[in-house]
Amino acid sequence: MVFAAGKGTRLQPYTDTMPKALVKVGGVPMIELILKKIIRSGFDDIIINVYHYADMIVDFLERNNNFGAKITISDESDELLETGGGLKKAAWFFDDHKPFLVHNIDILSNIDLEAFYKAHLTNNCLSTLAVKERNTSRSLLINSNGELSGWRNNQTGEEKIPVMDKENLIPIAFSAIHVMSPDILPLITETGKFSITDVYLRLIKEHRIMTYRHDADFWFDMGRTEFLSQAAPYVGLTGR
């Protein structure tokens, strides 16, 4: 699943007239960059949620023959559901009982998605989150085994640590790329608009959520205007 439904307010004025997914980085629309990387990595049956200028995304995909993949649209035009709500609305799509990749539209990285997916298969957990050592305003907190144990807002100091063992937790930045087991879907009891991070923090009291470190890879948040020019030189270097 590709999360592409955001309003893209951090990319104004570009997103005043187009969706974030079609903002160009190094001359290439974000959605093209992400889809080509995902497809090269072996994921060719994809659902994309849309909201802001949804029709423009659908038209772009049709003009490009979906880049050779099978693409389904999850339309949130009536209500923007955030990451958790968006995933829950699309849950029907994941009916083959296999783990699935979830990727934000505005993330550019050379992370090896095939290796990431295979790592999840050995983790025996509900979800595996790609993480990287970098500066961030909000950190995941993990234990020495790499299990998700909490969350911290580095600007306000607010923490959410639902687990019993709160000692020696390690802050790490989330890369907005996940691999999930379909077993997580019936456990999402939240309704309406909500964050998948809040779901994870609720579930870790009884379930394992693991992390996958990719510190050696580059990573850019293309969802901010100030980072577009920084990401541009890396557009052709994302690999699989």
Image (cartoon, rainbow, N blue to C red):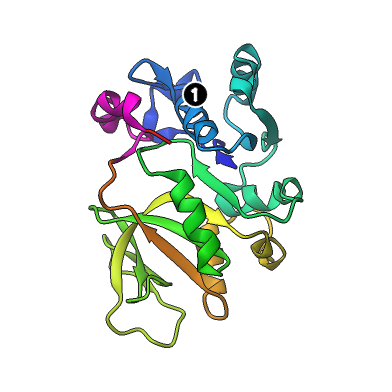
Q: Which residue corresponds to the image point at 28% horizontal and 71% vertical from the top-left?
A: 170
Q: Residues within 10 Å of mark 1 (few under 14, many from 20)?
A: some
What amino acid is labelled 1 in the image?
A: Glu
Query: Looking at the rendering, which quadrant does residue 108 occupy?
Result: top left
* Residue 115 image position (x, y, % from top left): 44, 50
Depth check: give the residue in front, 43 or 220: 43
Left or right side of 44 for 107: left
Q: Which residue corresponds to the image point at 38% horizontal and 29% vertical from the top-left?
A: 11
The quadrant of the picture occupied by the C terminus is top left
Residue 126 is at least partly visible in this image: yes
Query: Looking at the rendering, which quadrant does residue 222 occupy?
Result: top left
Whether residue 232 is in magenta: the answer is yes
Q: Which residue corresponds to the image point at 45% horizontal and 24% vertical from the top-left?
A: 15
The segment highlighted magenta reads 219-238
Q: Which residue corresponds to the image point at 51% horizontal and 25% vertical from the top-left?
A: 19
Residue furthest bottom as drawn: 164
Residue labelled with disc 1: 32
Depth check: give the residue in front, 231 or 7: 231
Depth check: give the residue in front, 194 or 104: 104
Residue 195 is at least partly visible in this image: no
| Mark 1 residue element | helix
Left or right side of 101 for 143: left
